[in-house]
Image: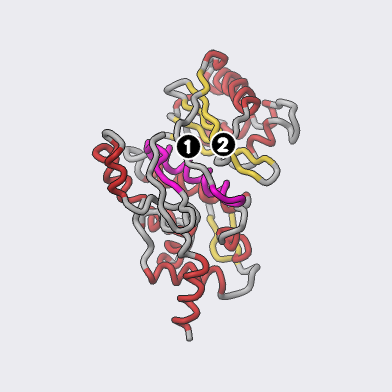
Amino acid sequence: MGNLFSQNCRKKHVDRFSMREPKKFVAEHSSAMGDDWEFNRAIGEEFCEKIEAPANMLKLQNIPGLWEKHFKELNEVFHPLTVEEDEKVVHALECGNSWEILVTHKPSNISITREVLQRLRPNAWLNDEVIDLYLELLKEREEREPKKFLKCHFFSTFFFKKLIGGGNEYDFRSVKRWTAPSKLGYSLIDCDRVFVPIHKDRHWCLAVVNIKDETFQYLDSLGGMDTYVLEVLAKYFMEEARDKSDKEIDTRFWKIELVDGLPLQINDWDCGMFMLKYIDFYSRALPLCFTQKENGQGDPCTES
């Protein structure tokens, strides 16, 4: 009976999606989340359930130089869950009270209940807790292996709304203390990339500040663009550099870089998952080489 239940639930929650975080990556992340290592490893994998890899990784060879340069990293990213790990995910989603706290991330004090975790199901939107916890784990990943990942800063989901005062009024003072060097241990201008989640009513987008390249990017899995967001961030970074590093940086002349072949969602609910995978790939210095299957068929990988 238990096996039948697991199989049915696994088909319901897992079959639609084939991409997973690499086991090593999730194991390292999840070890910081609780004492039950195996359980938390499976939970960590579920963060990536909704985004899919191309059905045939050999298609990556069609992109000049990509396969050779990123083979090891891409092999990690596209590593599937085992049956046992799938069953742990199903158990976490289905077996118990919806208010039960499944895991608490002590450094950020973010707790994930079963109800929150169930937002990872198909047809559901991600909320602040899931996104912010994932970003915390990405930062911890970078700190453990600084040579493997770019130096990044991951703002929380509340940052941009705070920066614009909950409306459209720019307010640097409201976020001035968020990036104190004594708190972070570094300055934003020393990073390679800075990621800013943008929430618009029921849609998640991403703004990226590429410090070294002096460019801004706006990634919307529905194909939209919002130059106002980038203008606000340009102003913020000028003030931030002046306030924290005593440097004058004129971001008015930085470029807005469009992302060719940006992976797009094909439904109405996976914007949060796409945003998180944009961040994951970019923090690895990988091109955005993933797709979401439509009607069970894999799409070719596109170069960004």
Quadrant position of residue 290: top left
Is residue 22 rendered to the left or right of residue 167?
A: left
Q: Nearer the viewer, residue 33 or 61?
A: 61
Up the image or down, 153 lies above or below 270; here it is above
- Percent of width and height locating residue 183: 54, 36
Q: Could you say which disc has been placed on residue 224 in the image?
A: none
Tag 1 secondary structure: loop
286 or 136: nearer the viewer: 286
Residue at 52% over, 39% down: 154
Q: Quadrant of residue 70?
A: top left
- Check residue 272 for magenta coloring: yes
Q: Is residue 108 visible?
A: no
Q: In the rendering, which numbered label is found on residue 262?
A: 1
Quick check: marks 1 and 2 in contact, CB under 8 Å?
A: yes
Amino acid type at mark 1: Leu
Can you say whether 88 is above or below 285 in the image? below
Q: Nearer the viewer, residue 131 or 268?
A: 268
Which residue corresponds to the image point at 42% horizontal and 55% vertical from the top-left? Answer: 297
Residue type at mark 2? Gly
Residue segment shown in magenta:
266-291
> Does residue 87 appear in this view?
yes
Q: Residue furthest left?
A: 68
Q: Which numbered circle lies on residue 223?
A: 2
> Which tag, 1 or 2, sits closer to the chain's start?
2
- Give the CA distance from mark 1 to mark 2: 8 Å
What percent of the width, then of the height, locates residue 211? Answer: 46, 24
